[in-house]
Structure formats: C-alpha cells, structure tokens
Image (cartoon, coloured by chain):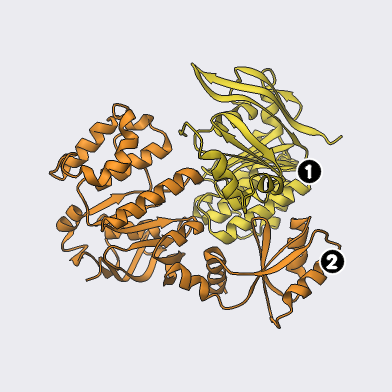
C-alpha cells in the first residue's frame, strides 16, 4: 500500500460555537500533489495551521509525516516546508544569505548548506544574483526562490498557500514545473490556489465548503461527477451554496 | 469626449532607475467597462494613482472627463470613485460609520444616492454595526465599493477588486459591475485574472510597464496569428517535457487539463503529427485537437515576443 504522509480523521476545530473545521477526514499519499480548495472562509487556513503544527484541533486525530498534531508539533515543523504568497524571504538579505539563514534554522550543517546552496543557485540560474538583495529581484524570481528555500531542508511535505498569486502567466507555469519536479523526487505537495486551471494540475483535489470537505477526488473524476467542463464549474456548483464567508 | 485619456504617460521610481509605466497611451469611452489586464508589477496601480491625481507622471498628459489630472485635480476628485487594491477604510469604524464618513466628505448623504448602492448595501445591512476590520474579505470588498460610489461618481476606478477572492465572490462582483455600467458609470478596472478579461468591453494587456495590445476581448483572441492545439495524455507532465523536446513544436504550456501548443511550421496536419509523436513516446490516453485561443494564450504569446 502506498505510504500516507497526512492522515486526518474527523478533525474539528471549534472557536466558541463556530466550527471553523467541521469533522474532516482525508489522507494524502507520498509524492502526491494535493489541491486544497475552498471558498474564502471555508476553513482552509485553519485546517492548514493545524497540519503545520501551529494550532491544536478541538477533536479528531491527524498525523503529518507520521507525527501527531497534538503532541509532536515540533517534529512536524522539522519535517515540513511552508511557503505563502506573503513572502517569507528577508528582502534586506541577499539571495545566498536567505538560503543560508533558512538552512541554519532547519539545523543543516555548514557543509551541507554550502553544497546545497551552490547547487540551488546553479539550478535556478541565479549565479549573477546570488549576492544581490532579495528585495531587488523580480516577483517571479522571489517566488521561485521562496519555494526552493521551503524545500531546502528536504522536507517530506511542503505546504503552499496560494503560491502563485499575482504573477504573470508564464512565471505561474514555470512555478508549476517546479512543483512537479519536487513531487517527482517524492516530496508531497499540499497546495491552495484561487486559479482553477491550477486545480487541474493536482493529482487529487478537495473542495471545502463551510468547514466540511464536500468533494475529494481526481479533477477528471470530479468533472465527470458534476458534469462540468472544467474545475471552475465544479467549484462554483459546490461553493455557491456556502453560508459563510470570511478570511 | 472620451471619459479617460492617457497620452504618452511615463512614470519612474527610485530616481529613474525603475521604469514602472513606459509611454502608455489609451482612451476609455464614456460608459465603457474597460479592463487593465496584467500581473503584479505591470504598472496597473501606478496608472490608477496618476489618474486619481495621487501621483505625478514624469512625462505625458492624462485627463478624466476632459479635466487635466494635474491642473484640475480638485474637480477630478469630486467626480471619480476610487477603490484601491489595498483595503483602505477605517478598520475601527463600523460599516455604517465608514459609509456616512465618506458621504459627508463629499457633501452628500447615504439617503441621497442610495439607489446606486442599494443592491450592494442590502447585503451589508445585517453587519452595519460591525467594525470594518472584523468583516470578511468579500464583505470588505463590497463596503469599499459602496464607499467609492456614495458620491455618485462619473468614473469609477477599481484596482484589482477581485484579487485573492474566491470564484463565487468574483462572479458576484462582476455582476455588480455590469449593473453599475448599465447605470451609465464609466468603469476602469484592473485584474491579474485573465479569465475576467472577457467580462470587459475593451481591455489593455499590460506587462512590464507597457501596453502590448488594446481591443475588445474578441478581437484580441482573433488576432492570434497561428493555429493553436490542445493535447493531453495520462501523464501530462511527461507529455509537457516530451513536447518541449519536440523540434517541430514552437511553444508548449500547461493549461488546466490540457497542454496548449503551437507549431514552428504548420502544414495543416499538426493534430496527426502530435498524436503520432505522443504515441511514439509511449503515452496513453492521448487526445489532440485544434482549439480557439483565449486571452491567456494571447498574453503569453505577446509576452514571449516582447522578451525576444
């Protein structure tokens, strides 16, 4: 059987009498590109925060990379990578300094950091920019660098929270090339996006509505079930019945 | 008279080192719904800020309703509505207080122009005593639009109103824009979502500070100069890599379920050729067809031409 790197069972997060995440159950397989979609306020961010070891659930169980979300938050953090649209890179550090900094945070040795950062800068074609401040890089490059930094410590899973917001259509696709490559090396990719064409690039997609998972399947299967031409239509059919909206 | 005119507008930052807007000229007709389509950093916000008299151009001239953005800035501010990309209302005031505040600034009342905002404001009413900072993203967006409309502007400037908003709220928002247009308000809206381009009457595709094309969405896609093909197989990423290595293929990009391809030399048998190539590479579940291009196809092609 394929290895499950995220196992969520009846996971619930309640704030007072508000069920931000309401009894969700799913599994993510190693090396999978898993799309996590939902309307604004459906509970995606809350669920992701639990899976990243940043917030405790109210009830239910979940393991991430084999570690328990109640008792092993530190181990979870060591075994995942995270990138969001709001850059986690330091604009006033150079490209190389950013890489070294994150390598250090994740406890890699100086030797490993040196080897991998040279390799990374070569792969990204950033040789001439290595000593430039990140703040001077174009948006597309920052994004690619942010992703590379998020997987620099070779995590089992990388969480991407709307990673492609605002970039041009070519850069957006180059970014997905990087996602595919990471998945091919066995890194599991857990990604949220508002671009419905990107939902098609995922192996499987969940759509959350009002705290619950309303659909979970391969894009092709979802389109068939909802007799929709594309994922946007599937999403629209499911999400338009949503009662709540927030961020 | 055109509602908005930009003539050779250039804007640089950091003492001329960063070219944000590069010699942009365009006109928006009265009552038109006009879209500025481009990614972050294309210069959209700079253009909006110059038209709303908040920023001075280095070169060129611009008018709104015939008024000069530099000389006549006081009059312009009375007749335009502006919704910036960043939420800019008072977070500590309630929904109702924010709206009253903006109405008062323009010497009017909520009641006087209620017709314009009724459809939108009715949805906000249950929350009228809630502080703006505690509203959801979609609700903030609607309140910001109400505040931009409360003085009954002649021209409405909306800077990325739908960025980061889900598909359902985005459709709702565009329905609202269509209604405002029917009331005769001229609307200039920007968006990074190419699929929203078709909802505008005319659009400008903008990239790295300059305009690549201006026309109706229909004409823009019809101007696509070559035939476009869509291909898929069971292993789409493998197919993408193989097609990029195919010497006969000019360009190949992922588009949702399919790849979109153009050929270096199209002799009319591309569908069969691409199918045969995919089979030879061992792909299964192959499908290839000729398709009509969309705005995003056009955008990518123009972008690549410009970069060459």
Q: Secondary structure at mark 1?
A: loop
As drawn, the chain in yellow is A
Q: Is residue A209 visible?
A: yes
At 54% from the left and 19% from the top, the residue drawn is A14
Q: Disc 1 designates what residue? A: A186
Tell me the quarter of the picture where residue B129 sits.
top left
| Chain B, hue in figure | orange
Of the 4 image quadrants, the one containing the N terminus of chain B is bottom left
At 28% from the left and 55% from the top, the residue drawn is B156
Label 2 to label 1: alpha-carbon separation: 27 Å
At 29% from the left and 35% from the top, the residue drawn is B90
Q: What's the chain of the residue with tag 2?
A: B
Q: Are marks 2 and 1 on the same chain?
A: no
Q: Nearer the viewer, mark 2 or mark 1?
A: 2
Q: Is residue A7 left or right of residue B40?
A: right
The circle on residue B279 is 2
Q: Position of residue B256 (x, y in %)?
A: 64, 55
Q: Position of residue A12 (x, y in %)?
A: 61, 21
């Amino acid at each position: 059987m394929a290895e499950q790197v995220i196992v969520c069972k009846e996971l619930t997060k309640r704030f007072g009498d508000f069920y931000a995440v309401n009894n969700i159950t799913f599994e993510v397989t190693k090396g999978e590109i898993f799309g996590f979609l939902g309307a604004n306020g459906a509970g995606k961010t809350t669920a992701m925060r639990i899976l990243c070891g940043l917030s405790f659930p109210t009830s239910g169980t979940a393991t991430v990379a084999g570690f328990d979300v109640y008792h092993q938050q530190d181990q979870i953090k060591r075994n995942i990578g995270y990138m969001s649209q709001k850059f986690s890179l330091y604009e006033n550090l150079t490209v190389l300094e950013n890489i070294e900094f994150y390598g250090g945070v994740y406890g890699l040795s100086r030797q490993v950091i040196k080897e991998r950062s040279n390799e990374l800068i070569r792969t990204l074609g950033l040789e001439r920019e290595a000593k430039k401040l990140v703040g001077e890089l174009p948006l597309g490059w920052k994004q690619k660098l942010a992703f590379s930094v998020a997987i620099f410590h070779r995590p089992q899973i990388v969480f991407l929270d709307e990673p492609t917001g605002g970039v041009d259509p070519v850069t957006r696709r180059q970014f997905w090339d990087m996602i595919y490559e990471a998945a091919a090396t066995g890194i599991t990719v857990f990604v949220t996006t508002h671009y419905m064409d990107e939902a098609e690039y995922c192996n499987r997609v969940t759509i959350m509505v009002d705290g619950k998972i309303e659909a979970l399947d391969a894009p092709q299967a979802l389109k068939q079930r909802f007799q929709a031409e594309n994922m946007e239509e599937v999403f629209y059919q499911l999400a338009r019945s949503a009662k709540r909206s927030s961020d | 008279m055109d509602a908005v005119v930009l003539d050779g507008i250039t804007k640089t930052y950091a003492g001329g080192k960063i070219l944000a807007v590069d010699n942009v000229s365009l006109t928006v007709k009265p009552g038109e719904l006009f879209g500025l389509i481009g990614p972050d950093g294309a210069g959209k916000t700079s253009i909006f800020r110059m038209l709303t008299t908040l920023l001075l151009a280095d070169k060129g001239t611009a008018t709104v309703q015939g008024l000069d953005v530099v000389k006549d800035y006081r009059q312009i501010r009375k007749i335009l509505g502006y919704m910036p990309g960043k939420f800019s209302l008072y977070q500590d005031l309630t929904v109702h207080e924010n709206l009253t505040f903006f109405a008062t600034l323009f010497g009017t009342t909520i009641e006087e122009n209620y017709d314009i905002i009724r459809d939108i404001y009715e949805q906000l009413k249950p929350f009228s005593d809630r502080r703006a900072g505690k509203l959801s993203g979609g609700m903030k967006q609607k309140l910001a639009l109400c505040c931009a409309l409360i003085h009954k502007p002649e021209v409405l400037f909306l800077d990325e109103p739908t960025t980061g908003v889900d598909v359902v709220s985005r459709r709702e928002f565009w329905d609202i824009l269509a209604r405002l247009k029917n009331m005769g308000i001229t609307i200039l809206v920007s968006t990074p979502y190419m699929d929203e381009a078709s909802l505008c009457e005319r659009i400008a595709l903008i990239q790295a500070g300059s305009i690549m094309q201006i026309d109706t969405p229909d004409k823009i896609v019809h101007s696509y100069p070559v035939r476009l093909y869509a291909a898929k197989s069971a292993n789409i990423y493998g197919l993408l890599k193989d097609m990029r290595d195919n010497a006969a293929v000019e360009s190949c990009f992922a588009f949702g379920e399919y790849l979109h391809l153009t050929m270096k030399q199209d002799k009319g048998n591309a569908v069969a050729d691409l199918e045969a190539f995919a089979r030879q590479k061992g792909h299964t579940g192959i499908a290839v067809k000729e398709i009509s291009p969309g705005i995003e196809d056009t955008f990518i092609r123009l972008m690549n031409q410009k970069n060459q």
